[in-house]
Image (spheres, rainbow, N blue to C red):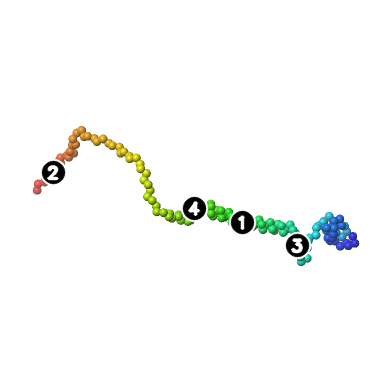
Amino acid sequence: MSDPIPGWYPDPEEPSRQRFWDGTRWTEARAYPVAAGLDGLPGPAPQEEERGTNWALVVGLLALLGVVLLAVWFFLLRGGSSEPAPVPTTAPTAPTAVPTAPTKKPTVPPVTPTAPPTAPTVPPTPPTAVPTP
């Protein structure tokens, strides 16, 4: 090679890539050139753009899933509602009594006394002595 300055040059074996010239010989280091953007500066690699797009898609889907799960919990799984019970539109009717079989009270046969009742005996009070003056 006529230019001994080290640097990246088109690869003599494959012109679509570059190879490093160390000033005396070609090294094994090879690289593909970066495509230039509209302003002449190297643009982002296509793989990086796809990863960025996929990342935004994943974040958006996770946010949507969170909103759906929150709505399901709020409307279906929350339990009791804070709304008052609905007011009936018709007047309530008296409950119908269910007839039951009459119950029999057990009867106790009357007891006839065998002896006349005795008056309680009161012991006589002892006479009290009245003191004389």
Instruction: Using residue 14 as the reference point, say whether residue 89 is left or right of it.
Output: left
Q: Which residue in the structure is indicated by mark 1? A: 64
Per the image, label 2 sits on a secondary structure element best described as loop
Q: CA–CA distance between discs 2 and 4?
A: 87 Å
- Mark in front: 2 vs 4: 4
Q: CA–CA distance between discs 3 and 4?
A: 58 Å
Q: Amino acid at mark 3?
A: Gly
Q: Quadrant of residue 127?
A: top left
Picture disc at residue 128: 2
Q: Are marks 2 and 4 in contact (CB under 8 Å)?
A: no
Q: Quadrant of the N terminus?
A: bottom right
Q: Which residue in the structure is indicated by mark 4? A: 80
Instruction: Using residue 23 as the reference point, say whether residue 48 is left or right of it.
Output: left
Q: Are marks 1 and 3 in contact (CB under 8 Å)?
A: no
Q: CA–CA distance between discs 2 and 1?
A: 111 Å
* Mark 3 vs 4, N-terminal side: 3
Residue at 24%, 36% in the rendered image: 110
Where is residue 118? Give x, y as percent. Answer: 18, 37
Residue at 35%, 43% in the rendered image: 99
Q: Which residue in the structure is indicated by mark 3? A: 43
Q: Are marks 2 and 1 in contact (CB under 8 Å)?
A: no
Where is residue 61? Give x, y as percent. Answer: 64, 56
Q: CA–CA distance between discs 1 and 3?
A: 32 Å
* Mark 1 vs 4, N-terminal side: 1
Residue at 37%, 44% in the rendered image: 98
Residue 97 seen anywhere in this rendered image of the structure: yes
Judge by depth and name the residue closer to the eye, 121 or 80. 80
Where is residue 10? Give x, y as percent. Answer: 85, 59
